[in-house]
Amino acid sequence: MLDLEDSGRQIGEKLFVLLSPNQKKELAQFVCDYEAGNIPSDVPGTTFLRGQYFFPPQIAQALTEIRVGDLYFCLEQRLVTVEGQVILLTVKEFDILALLIMHPRRVFTYEMITELVWQEDYGIFSRKAIINHVSNLRRKLKVSADIPDYIKSVYGIGYKFNSAS
């Protein structure tokens, strides 16, 4: 859990584990450019994207937000809360939840989850890896005993998000 009294390094270390390998590379490039003085400091909201600086449009765009009971999910902010408590998820945990919550009641096989979340062939990752990620995700979402199990197992096949929870 993030503590605002942590040092910048401690906060960075906690956030760094949540980044994908590409995000880590982009962050490293950003830090190098920042230290070299190559970032335009007079332009607010400048971000580094795929090797160049990106100036986001000022047009307000709707966020992909889903609320189910005490669960709140925002795709663009990569934010999940339960009973108002922020849930820190790894990249893969968030991506699995995003896949399931955006397609409620649809069953996703282990193979489909591997292809859609890892974007790899199923043979590279085992069922056990997916089971472990889903187990961790369920544990993190269960902040109190009265919170329902949002992710349902479909025995021998995969998982689905139960929006009726």
Image (cartoon, grey):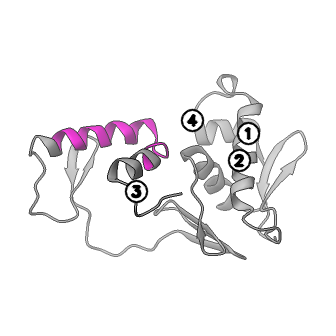
Residue 51 visible within the image: no
In the rendered image, the residue lying farthest to the right is 155
Give the foreground label among 4 and 1: 1
User: In the image, residue 11 lies at what x, y percent?
Assistant: 40, 52
- Whether 121 is among the magenta residues is no
User: Quick check: 3 left or right of 165?
Assistant: left
Q: In the picture shown, does residue 44 fall above or below 35? A: below
Looking at the rendering, the stretch of residues picked out in magenta corresponds to: 15-33
Give the foreground label among 2 and 3: 3
Residue that carries the numbered disc 3 in the rendered image: 6
- Label 2 neighbourhood size at 10 Å, few (<14), some (14-19), many (20+)? some
Tag 3: residue type?
Answer: Asp
Q: Are marks 1 and 2 in contact (CB under 8 Å)?
A: yes
Could you tell me how far apart the alpha carbons at marks 3 and 1 are, in whole angstroms? 30 Å
Give the foreground label among 4 and 3: 3
Residue at 69% x, 42% y is 133
Residue 160 visible within the image: yes
Tag 2: residue type?
Answer: Asn
Of mark 4 and mark 3, the one earlier in the sequence is 3
Of mark 2 and mark 4, the one earlier in the sequence is 4
| Helix, strand or loop for the magenta stretch, by majority | helix
User: In the image, residue 72 lies at what x, y percent?
Assistant: 62, 71
**Viewer-proximal residue among 109 and 66:** 66
